Image (cartoon, grey):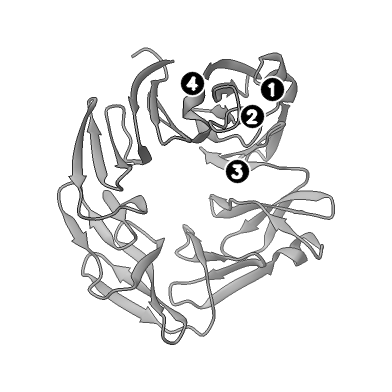
Amino acid sequence: MKLISKINTARMVKHISNDEFYYVNKDKQLVKYLNSKTENIISNIKCEVIEEWNSGLLINECIFYNYSTFEPLFEENNIYKCLVISNDKLIIKKNDFINEKIKFGVYNHKNNLILWIELNKNINPYFFNSNNTFISYTKLGLENYDLNLNLLWRHTFSSLLNEDEVVTSDEIVEVSDVIYFVLHGGGKHDCFALDANTGKVVKTYPDLVGQLIVEDETIYFLHTEIISILNTKTDEITTWFIDDLMKEKGVDSLLFPRWAVYDGLIYFSQSKGADRYSDNIGARFGVLDPIKKEMLWQHQLPLENGIIGEIKVNQNRIYLHTQDQTLFIFKRKDE
């Protein structure tokens, strides 16, 4: 692992390869990084939100950049992307501030047509299923709709866990048409697996906690003290208590860690003691091998950079975004 570049005032790294990516600078301008050189791509639009879509970038949920030109997607104002359906389709919403309503529709980028759908209920599109339906996610439960916004099935979290007060995991993931999420309440920490087509509970896994990350049909449950790994093909769960290892290696018990999984390895950060305004030690990060159950390496950043806010790993690069909006780029291994 070797530091190869550092960029000040950078955030939101997208379209990553070993030698090229895009980021937003402190002035919210889109910048291209290629072979250690930077180029301002756009300066007349403040880039607030960026995501990859349709072999390009979707900017501020209403502008498309295909890596050569920019294209406003909608003729009217107050129309925004709500959920990505496919490489050429979006679920969109239009804010009606006068009547205090939100109008939903399906946008087709091939012909720039919008199919508006009237709906007398509030939905919150969260992610698109492989069966051409989408999940609406609220604090109370999940609803599944088709693209005509017909309700297919519904679950409340309290009824699933059989508890009055329930807290959900921040992540809901899908693997092979099965939806996974964790519910906490009444001393229970259960992961539910729901059939995406029918809403039927396929299985419940007790005592699973942490952030959910999926790689190759394996779900990683990443917690400050314990890591659990669910192989969805075999239904096997392996558990690894990492707190003693962290203390042994001088990292200490993890506080507000950031996680990434790549090629079966788990990348983590340590926030304890690393706040640039009040603490006295640089942020640390490292990588864990869950098969060997060992820490492969760890590294410490200067205190002036503060807490690590995000970790991304792609190909042979590690990207760290810190509290002072510095972007660190490390080489994972010798090329």
* Residue at the disc numbered 2: 272
* Residue at the disc numbered 3: 212
In contact (CB < 8 Å): disc 2 and disc 1: yes
Amino acid of disc 4? Pro
Q: Looking at the image, is mark 1 or mark 3 nearer the viewer?
A: 1
Viewer-nearest residue: 212 or 151: 212
In contact (CB < 8 Å): disc 2 and disc 3: no
For label 2, the crowd category at 10 Å Cα-Cα, with few meaning under 14, some 14 to 19 and many 20 or more, is many
Q: Looking at the image, is mark 3 or mark 4 nearer the viewer?
A: 4
Marks 1 and 3 sit apart, C-alpha to C-alpha, by 22 Å
- Above or below, 84 relative to 274: below
Question: Disc 2 on helix, strand or loop?
Answer: loop
Give residue 302's mark: 4
For marks 2 and 3 on the same chain, the one whose residue lies earlier in the sequence:
3
Q: Extreme top residue here?
A: 334
Q: Extreme left residue here?
A: 68
Amino acid of disc 1? Asp
For marks 3 and 4 on the same chain, the one whose residue lies earlier in the sequence:
3
For marks 2 and 1 on the same chain, the one whose residue lies earlier in the sequence:
1
Amino acid of disc 2? Lys
